[in-house]
Image: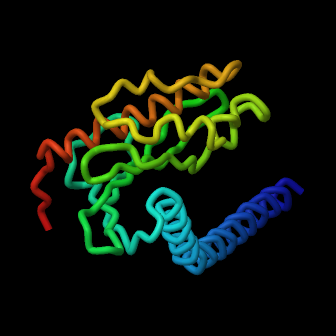
Amino acid sequence: MQENKKGNVGFSAVSLLLISGFIACLVALVNSITAPVIAEHGVESLKENIALIFAGSEDFDDITGTVTETSGVEAIYKVKSATGGEDNYCVHTSTAGYGGAVELLVGFNCDGQIAGVAVLSADSETPGVGQKITEKQFLNGFKGLSYNDEGAKVDGVTGATVSSKAALSGVNSACVAIDKILNGEEEEVSA
């Protein structure tokens, strides 16, 4: 009887191993099918958000690797003008808010003036209070400021101090990155 129990345990262990391996293969297959679709959706979403800031923008290039790392900055994009004028910039930032990450896309004209701010993610902020950082009234407070202006000139949202400070911190991180670009602190990128 003792040998029968050992045989059952061994059979169960092998069965679980085979089932786990099969499930892992299925997950890898699904990931390989969906990963390109998810990446394409991310690029389209980014294009839509850039178009909110720069209407009529033609395309963008990711120039993140050409600028020394800046705290809170996830990515930097050079936005190509549809009119053939000078290029603009968008900086993707992520800072800690009240309930999670607050992700912003901060657009700068070629002269360093903030053209607009789009909220990419602030879903974890308190509904009705912290979510007010996503409203145009708050975001328009950044428009027209220069990258070297004090971001504290923007009024926060009453009752949402942490969320407001997260948005302000994100914009200030973007300003630091743009300062590096406009003042020539770009790195040589090796291909």
Q: Is residue 28 above or below residue 87?
A: below
Image quadrant holding the N terminus, namely bottom right
Residue 37, position as x, y percentages in the image: 57, 77
Looking at the image, which residue is at 47% across and 37% down? 142
Judged left or right of residue 98, residue 8 is right
Q: Considering only vertical position in the picture, is 57 above or below 97?
A: below
Quadrant position of residue 60: bottom left
Query: Which of the two residues, 46 or 187, is positioned nearer the viewer here?
Result: 46
Q: What residue lies at 64% left-to-right and 25% top-to-bottom?
A: 157
Q: In this figure, which colouring scheme has been used for the structure? A: rainbow
Q: Is residue 87 visible?
A: yes
Drawn side of residue 158 relative to residue 149, left or right: right
Q: Which of the 4 image quarters holds residue 96?
A: top right
The x and y percentages for residue 35 are: 54, 73
Q: Nearer the viewer, residue 20 or 120?
A: 120
Picture quadrant where residue 123 is located: top right
Q: Position of residue 70 (x, y in %)?
A: 30, 38
Work out whether 133 lies above or below 98.
Answer: below
**What residue sits 45% from the left and 41% below the top?**
143
| Image quadrant containing the C terminus | bottom left
Image location (x, y in percent) of residue 21: 64, 70
Q: Nearer the viewer, residue 65 or 54?
A: 54
Q: Residue at x 66, y 41 (%)?
A: 135
Q: In the image shown, does 107 or 44 lie closer to the viewer? A: 107
How many labels sit on residues?
0
